[in-house]
Amino acid sequence: MTTALVTANPHGTISLRSIAGRIGFLPALLVMLVAGMSAVDPQFYGIINVLNILRNASLLAIVACGQALVIIAGGFDLSVGAVVALASVVTAKAMAATAAAFPGNNALIIASGVAAGLGSGAVVGLVNGFCVAKLKVSGFVVTLGTMSATAGVGLMITNGIPVYGMPEIFVKGFGRAQALGLPTAVHIAVIVILVMVFAQRRTLFGRYVYAIGGNVDAAVVSGVTIQRHIVGTYVVSSVLAALTGILLTAQVGSGQASFGGDRMMLQSIAAAVIGGVSLRGGVGRVEIVAVSALFLTILGNALNLLHVDSRLQPVFLGVIMVAAVALDELSRRSKPRV
Amino acid sequence: MSDLELSVGAKDPDRPRLTLSRRLWSAVLPVALAVLLLGFATFDHGVLSSANLLNIAQQTSYLALFAMAQTVVILTRGFDLALGPTVSMVSVGTALAMAGATASGHGTAAVLLAGLAAGFALGIACGLFNGVVIALLGVNPFVATLGSYNIAIGIATTLSSGRPVQGVPPLFSQIFYGGSLFGVPAAIAITVAVGVLLHLLLARTVFGRSLYLIGTNPRAAAVAGLPVKRILVATYVLCSGLAALGAIMMTARTGSGEPNLGGALSLQAIAGAVVGGTSLAGGRGGVGTAVLGALFITILSNGMNLTRIDGYVQMVVLGAIVIIGVLLDRLRQERRQ
């Protein structure tokens, strides 16, 4: 690490700034937050609270990873929150329907539910990708439209009433289960993050996404098939949102159209942006986004433990978001342009 | 001034040839509006009753005002996600100020003045925050206004403890909701007046024209010597100021300060502007597009309500309409090139 820094710096001086520039200020903030909270409130590092934080951070991180991929390609996905809700409802409905047709066949019931949930996410992603890539409508508008439509479909299916009727084992043995002392959601989030990191670094898809977000024209000239990869980013984002919807469903034990929503969508964008993903496209790493999701979750948890009025909490989130991006922008400006 | 017009106009040098198709395209939305109204009228004759038409006009006037506010910033390639929470915050602030002034025994005029001052001050403060963060700190408008979105929601719910704020004097509602000018309800009269003024501002002043130039080509605007940063700050203040006016009108309608008044307004206002033909790429749009878009969305949801279409289905239709509207707009632009 040190040698890498030295070779990267022709002047041979390892300034604090260059280190900060490499790792970013986010982990430092995270450590400060954790250390501060641990000193103030022992409840904070109690096992129940830690598991609670990890579970919520995992759900957010999964959605934020997909969101980050779309943003890196130069797009936007406002529909993720609605997809979480839709997938939850569809999964529960499909399980209930399969359970009625094949009672007792738990493997089939769960498989059909999960497939239906992920499938509903893939459909929304395909629609988003098709409208953005083929019809060339701005991603913001497309996903604004599909957000409304998807939320509407979710509510239509359920009339706003929670859907029950999923097998016991799906809830007890999967949603609320723990392996190696950690909730299922954490394991799945780690797998998702690892796969995404691999995809970003080592696969053509991942490299092309950077190329498209960095400079579309250059990517076209280099022979990258733009449309297919843009559709791919939206499908990944929606499927990951659907996965979160399924995990939430398994945890709560019912399919609800009120899951996700605007809050999840805004938080996923906040996590991506605080995690260093540039809204101009072409820049961003999924693992930092995951750290940022953890940071946001701990921040919310800390505000709760400190008894900060829940109504006032959005103010902190807003200020920190703007400050993080403004700092990033200012530090970029002070660097010499190559 | 003439310089600016030249550089804006220089994008399409062969104007005369294009005007015909351009005119045809610009007639698409009004025709669609008429078809929509007549279509709904065949299902329910109440749609075309004068009471319902007045109702539509009144409903449209609020959304049109917010769509205009949004259009102003979209012209410069920005947008304001915080518009809805700004409306909530202004509503709560206005009501609290008036309740406070009443409690401390001031006269009616002073109470109304206090409410208006508090409302506009909050709105302008929000606009200043957005403008400074976006123009001076260089933060992307999406992130900046997402930040102020959260901040404004927090302030609105904290100030009001999450409950409606009572104590709005009846006179306030009588003026800004019940009042009328030459028989025209207050909401419509105010929106028309603001629309005319804003149109003049956008079309006839250096400030207005420079918004179009900044949206079309920000670098050219900077090179041309425009104080881009200052103009952008002013733009966001104008946007939030208009939102504050709308919030005051809506507070007069409900008769209390509502912390949830803004709700989905940010995105609705963007949808209204964009469906009307305002380009998110900046530099295209105006008062006309905002009003048309707002009218379209209002008529659509009014008609769907009267024909008893399920509220959830309406969400799906609205989502589809937004995408189709922008798609049509893109085709229209492609044809022009």
Image: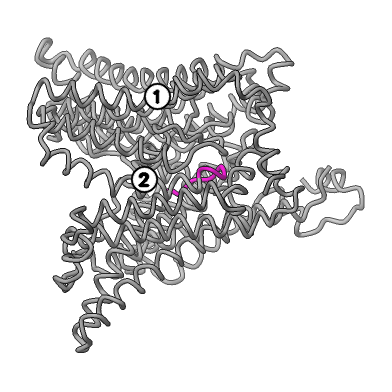
- The x and y percentages for residue A232 are 51, 19
- The x and y percentages for residue B249 are 26, 59
Give the prevailing secondary structure in the magenta stretch: loop
The residue that disc 2 covers is A56
Residue A106 in view: yes
Q: Is residue B129 above or below residue B52?
A: below
Along the line of sight, which residue is nearer the eye, A178 or B136?
B136
Magenta stretch, residue numbers: B74-81
Q: Residues within 10 Å of mark 1 (few under 14, many from 20)?
A: few
Q: Chain of mark 2?
A: A
Along the line of sight, which residue is nearer the eye, A338 or B267?
B267
Q: Is residue A292 above or below residue B99?
A: above
Q: Would you identify the image quadrant in which residue B149 lies?
A: bottom left
Residue at horizontal 51%, vertical 63%? B129
Q: Which mark is residue B27?
A: 1
Image quarter (top left, top right, bottom left or bottom right) of the C terminus of chain B: top right
Q: Secondary structure at mark 2?
A: helix
Q: Would you identify the image quadrant in which residue A308 lies?
A: bottom left
**Amino acid tagged 2:** Asn
